[in-house]
Image: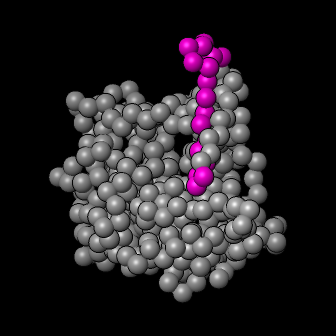
Amino acid sequence: MYDVVTIGSATIDAFVESDAADIVSVSTKHASTDFMAFPYGAKVEIDGFRTAVGGGGLNAAANLAHLGLNTSAVFKIGDDFLGKNIKHRVNSSGVDISNIIESEDETTGFSIILLSFEGNRTVLAHRGTNGTIKESEINFDAVKNSKWLYIAPLNGQSGAVLDKLAMFAEENNVNVAINPGSSSLKKGLKYFEKILATAEVVVMNKEEASLVTKIEVRPDTKTESFSSEVIHPDIKAMLDKLKSTDAKVVIITDGKHGVYAYDGKKYYRCPEFPAKVVSTLGAGDALSSTFMAALDYTNWNIEKSLMLASVNAASVVSNFGAQEGFLTFEEMEKQLKEAPAFRVETV
């Protein structure tokens, strides 16, 4: 029996560092967007290059195994150099690979990650086999014999297995943590209502929450300011709408502004744990999977679980790869003791 089975993408990530990238901000009356820009038609020198294993499903699996959970990962790879590399690296991380799916005629997914001087990134992603997972290829017995099912973003045709997985877990009393991802969320909240209702934990970032709830976060103006409030009223509205699906705990991540959560009784705001940002890739995977594991570790203490998750995510962003910097619970506890001012606010 497994503590957790994860399902999601598996990729080889190629990290490209270039200080030549400009960050261009474009603002409208209601929103602003940042773009990473290179001179059009130019030959741009890069300052660093390296590869690593990544993907939402694998990042979560590696973190959970590092936390001591008996973890198996469901992902799909091709019979190619990239697939063999992923399989070897995942197996060496302590994650069970007996439930992986291998295809002889498809290519393994990969990503090119462009890193800015600020530590943020733009990802150029090729789905490959990640977008072709079929229901018939999944070992549902492994899910049935697990305490938790962690569902990372499923893209392309793979999204079609989402409702079946969630319902199967519900019917077999398996706890569900889900990070749906923007591709699936474009279908709207109505599509996800039944799926989210099966979940103990639902995690998405602010942009994804806005996409699925159709709620925009209003900026401060000369006549209206929200900066004095613990949680922006539009964030609260998003949490309310997501919680209306009957998920046990809903979480919205907001980068440097921290994490928000709602369990139907209290709203929580956990600030970002202090860290020197090297790369933000994998931070969301670390936070959501750590929070899920921390619920059992703390006997469902949401406040403490948010703090632990924030510490582990901060450690990940302090390192280059999405699977570097993972901490144990003991190491997270030690860092929290050394930062007594770090607290969660509740409303």
- Residue at image position (36%, 54%) is 186
Q: Is residue 107 visible in this depiction of the protein?
A: yes
Residue 127 in magenta? Answer: no
Residue 37 in magenta? Answer: yes
Find residue 37 and report its horizontal and vertical position in percent: 61, 29
- Residue at image position (72%, 46%) is 277
On the picture, is 291 further left or further right than 127?
right
Tell which residue pokes out farthest to the front in this image: 223
On the picture, is 151 further left or further right than 338?
left
- Residue at image position (61%, 33%) is 36
Q: Quadrant of the N terminus?
A: bottom left
Range of magenta residues: 29-45
Find residue 317 and report its horizontal and vertical position in percent: 66, 48
- The secondary structure that dominates the magenta segment is loop
Q: Quadrant of residue 221?
A: bottom right
Q: Identify whether 217 is placed above or below 129.
A: below
Q: Nearer the viewer, residue 104 or 289?
A: 289
Q: What is the total number of numbered labels drawn onto the structure image? A: 0
- Residue at image position (63%, 55%) is 255
Q: Quadrant of the C terminus?
A: bottom right
Q: Quadrant of residue 176?
A: bottom left
Find residue 100 and report its horizontal and vertical position in percent: 31, 47
Q: Is residue 145 visible in this depiction of the protein?
A: no
Tell which residue pokes out farthest to the left in this image: 136
